[in-house]
Amino acid sequence: MKNILTKLQRRINKLRHRLQIAEYMRVAYLSPRQVVLITSRLDNMDNVLPIDWHMPLSFFPKLYCICLESKNFSSEVIKVSKCFAVNFMSAEYEDQILMSGRISGTDADKFKLTGFEKIAAAKIDVPLIKNALGWLECEVIQKIITGDHTLFIGRVVYENIERNNTKEQLYHISRVNN
């Protein structure tokens, strides 16, 4: 009986935790957040991950940060390779972007599944996405564990933008029913 009560208490605690996270995310996502694709490479294995936890940190030096779940595949790859690229995508790729976030790079080749075409980065050993609106190539200079996520601070070593871009970008928007 005691064992059953202990298991039940664990389930109740997990549900409480999920509800707390849900409420936190409802507030944090009251404003739209731009979705980007993070690309990385380790041992000739390429990966792509959509995120909306990213931002510029400094102009001098040029610093950009991304925040990833500490135990996910992309986080592990970036910890070892010490570099990543930020690919700014247009909204026309929404289906492919969403697909790239639904599976792990440990289980599949996300580039093949999504149809994203790779091109070589100029300064670091990661793939870039050919049809991106712009790219930031970053070398990791610091990582900070922030609870269950890791903040990777990257020094931007190269950037490029498609100058004739008029395409709409993709934003994560929460729909909150009051």
Image (cartoon, helix red, strand yellow):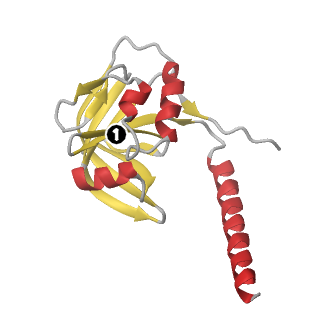
Residue at left offset 20%, top offset 45%: 43
Depth order, front residue of 44/54: 44
Give the labeled residue for mark 1. 47
Depth order, front residue of 113/129: 113
Q: Amino acid at mark 1?
A: Asn
How far across and how far down the image is residue 127, in percent? 26, 32
How far across and how far down the image is residue 25, in percent? 64, 51
Q: Is residue 54 left or right of residue 157?
A: right
Depth order, front residue of 59/13: 13
Residue found at the very far right of the displayed protein: 178
Determine which quarter of the picture holds residue 157: top left
Residue at left offset 29%, top offset 29%: 128
Q: How many marks?
A: 1
How far across and how far down the image is residue 41, in percent? 26, 42
Residue 169 can be seen in this image: no
Residue at left offset 67%, top offset 61%: 18
Residue 159 drawn above or below residue 139: above
| Category of crowding for the residue at label 1, using alpha-carbon neighbours closer than 10 angstroms: few (below 14), some (14–19), many (at least 20) | many
SS at mark 1?
strand
